[in-house]
Image (spheres, rainbow, N blue to C red):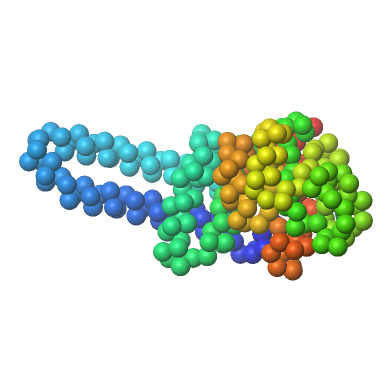
Amino acid sequence: MSNNKNITKYQFLLLSVIGLIILMAVITGLWYFISPRLHEFNETLPFFLLSALRIFFVILIIGTVLVLLTSIFEKNFLIANFAVKLFIKIVYPIVIFLGSILGMSKAELGESFIKVNDSLVRALKPKYKAEDVIILLPHCLQDTDCPIRITVDVKNCKNCGKCTIGKILEIANQYNISVFVATGGTLARRIIAEQKPKLIVAVACYRDLVSGIQDAFPIKTFGIINERPFGPCVNTTVSIKEIKSTLKKVIKH
Ligand code: SF4
């Protein structure tokens, strides 16, 4: 669950479309700038280049419409797999750049990106065996007064009720899914490399989730943003309901 309920996938999608329009306008401007010189060089070259440019624009527009439909309706409009890759690798940095020019918050765009990513992964309707799925949690979910070392083995948790770790373990046990607690990106990457999951259900702040989703790709990741009632990195919490409903959708029964 997001900390900010007003953040939806639509902010990111809207900026992606604006980014695309700006990109096409810049390319068109460049074309009008260089085309007279191309004419001097060769009579037929501008015709071929213009045709190629038009085909590129048509593909870009059709691709963008399909990505938008995939994310909005969460149905696989032919290119959901490609859409996930496109958004993670290319569109995110462009939108962040555009957002910074427009004075938009990186945190809000990051949260919106996570929602777009989740919608695109949901569109694929992934179903996995329990052994192919892991839950990755941040250390800050653990109560700061808890003396138990759960990063070594999360099963050490006594489910005392002071934090959400115990409840998450209960749900994970019902589905027979492994849970790991990472103190940072390096440990998270090591866990993923060792476990080789096909799907990750990750809980973290927007910043760690965005970089985690990008790092883990092509492994699909569902990102669940933690809640921070005491500020960042201390006694954070997460919606158990959201973890439960995510697992229900992705685990093969
Ligand atoms: S639920 Fe587990 S991790 Fe959380 S405070 Fe209790 S024993 Fe510690």
Q: Is residue 110 left or right of residue 242?
A: left
Q: Residue at x 29, y 52 (%)?
A: 26
Task: Report the quarter where the C terminus lies.
Answer: top right
Q: Residue at x 28, y 48 (%)?
A: 27
Residue 43: x and y in percent read 9, 35
Q: Residue at x 41, y 40 (%)?
A: 62
46 in relation to 27, above or below:
above
208 in relation to 230, above or below:
above
111 in relation to 154, above or below:
below
Residue 135: x and y in percent read 74, 43
Q: Is residue 146 left or right of residue 106?
A: right
Task: Report the quarter where the N terminus lies.
Answer: bottom right
110 vs 7, nearest the viewer: 110
Q: Give residue 147's quadrant in the image.
A: bottom right
For residue 75, say whether it is visible: no
Residue 131: x and y in percent read 77, 31
How many dots with numbers?
0
Q: Residue at x 64, y 64 (%)?
A: 4
Residue 244: x and y in percent read 78, 47
Q: Is residue 138 left or right of residue 163?
A: left
For residue 251, say whether it is visible: yes
185 vs 201, nearest the viewer: 185
